[in-house]
Amino acid sequence: MVSENLIPARCYFVGIGGVSMSALALLLHDRGIFVRGSDLVESDFTKSLRQRGISVHIGESEEIEEDAVVYTGAVGLWNPQLASAKRAGKRLITRAELLGMVAKTFPRVLAVAGCHGKTTTTSMLAHIFECGNRSYTCHIGGEDLEFGNYRTTGEEFFVTEACEFQRSFLSIHSEVALILNTDRDHTDCYSDDGEVVEAYALFAAQSERAVVNADDRNARKIPHSLSFGRYSGDITAGRIYSDGERYRFTVFEKSVPTVDIRLAIHGAVHIQNALAAYAAARLMGFSATEIKRGIESFHGVKRRFESMGTLAGVPVICDYAHHPKEIEATLKTAERICRGAVRLVFQPHTYTRTRDLMEDFVHVLKKAENPIIYKTYAAREAFDHEGSAYTLVSRIPEAAYVQSPEQLKKRLLSEIGEEDLILVLGAGDIYSITQSILDF
């Protein structure tokens, strides 16, 4: 029988085009493991995998010959390929389980968890390891503008995002667990805040050392080796200055000024992400100077306040924000750099999140001027009227509902002014929809 901790020699990925799945496929491929897979749609990720020599089938009809099948939570066991593989007695491995197996093959592991900021902070850490000339492999849940979703220079350190969805981060045992925040996001997995905090505490307990956000009232209660925060903690920021929403600040270690950092990305929220990366890197043995070089070399992640182009000459910015707190922070950043009005477009992501956080969504979206709500990206869920975009719009008198790229473009063209800024938020397909309506 194959050991649970042993990565199979031949793996088939169902949903290989996902950002995390494609990164894991590349990682195994680079280690000499045979990888093949399928996805429902063609994408930049599937094309990139083929360029690297990995066979990708578009659709569900392909027969699986491999003994092990990797799949994500977004692909249920009702999937025809998975159902067939299960009947054939093949070994089924979730994405989270595979990530845990991969982590066990590295001597040193740094895992980044939290509702907000995982991708940005993990990417910052990749740049720190790069500038520090360390032997490392980084698994990113988004696309760093330089490294993409996967970067490797060696196999001493493994840096990875650790997602709380379905408690998948409990598959990872790390040297350092970094907890950015403990906000409840996946309301389909956690019934209340208590369950969320309990999961994060278990995640930290599986690590040798934990770094927590001292500004988060729940995270700071979790036993830890080091803390960070804008306002409290072992690692803090002071002497903060803004230049067009790009910030520079001094890092203080236990009240002692240590190093000055100038961020190359927009948004005050990234001060917190930088402090988190700084604290974790210090625990991993980096000098303050190495960390400074790494953070300052980071120029952003796709779909994180990304300039997309223009519509009728008006700039368009896209951001992955899909939680009320993320929407609020991104809207504030946009308002500070916009001379006219910020025209907000938001696509709700899943019915459960929208339903369970409805009051928070209504509160923050009412702060925008005549927001446009695009139809819900359902992801893995069936329609639920209580959590639908229809219901959300009904609670915001100034909001408008659209359900096609043509309607979105028409609505925006009827409202935008010369000095406005279009801010498109959401974690679903709103990114590609926006691309389709731009000037060029």
Image (cartoon, rainbow, N blue to C red):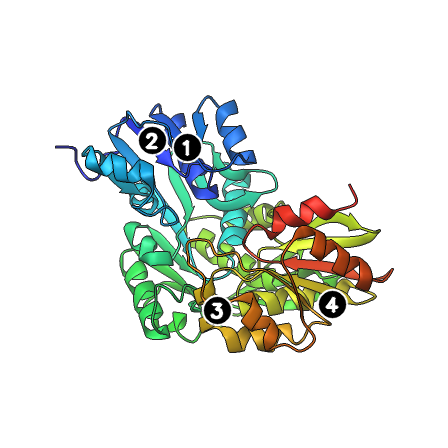
Q: Secondary structure at mark 1?
A: strand
Q: Which residue is mark 4?
A: 335
Give the residue type at disc 2.
Answer: Tyr
Residue neighbourhood size for the residue with mark 1, other residues' Cα within 10 Å, grouped as few (<14), some (14–19), many (≥20) = many
Q: x, y percentage for residue 420?
A: 81, 62
As drawn, the residue found furthest toward the right would be 418
185 shown above or below 47: below
**Residue 89 appears anywhere in the view:** yes
**Numbered disc in front, either 4 or 2:** 2
The residue closer to the viewer here, 173 or 355, is: 355
Q: Which residue is mark 1?
A: 38
Q: x, y percentage for residue 412?
A: 76, 59
Residue neighbourhood size for the residue with mark 4, other residues' Cα within 10 Å, grouped as few (<14), some (14–19), many (≥20) = some
Q: Which residue is mark 2?
A: 12
The residue closer to the viewer here, 182 or 351, is: 351
Q: Which mark is residue 30?
A: none
**Numbered disc in front, either 1 or 4:** 1
Q: Secondary structure at mark 2?
A: strand
Q: Of the residues under marks 2 and 3, which one precedes in the sequence? A: 2
Q: Which residue is mark 3?
A: 385
**Numbered disc in front, either 1 or 2:** 1
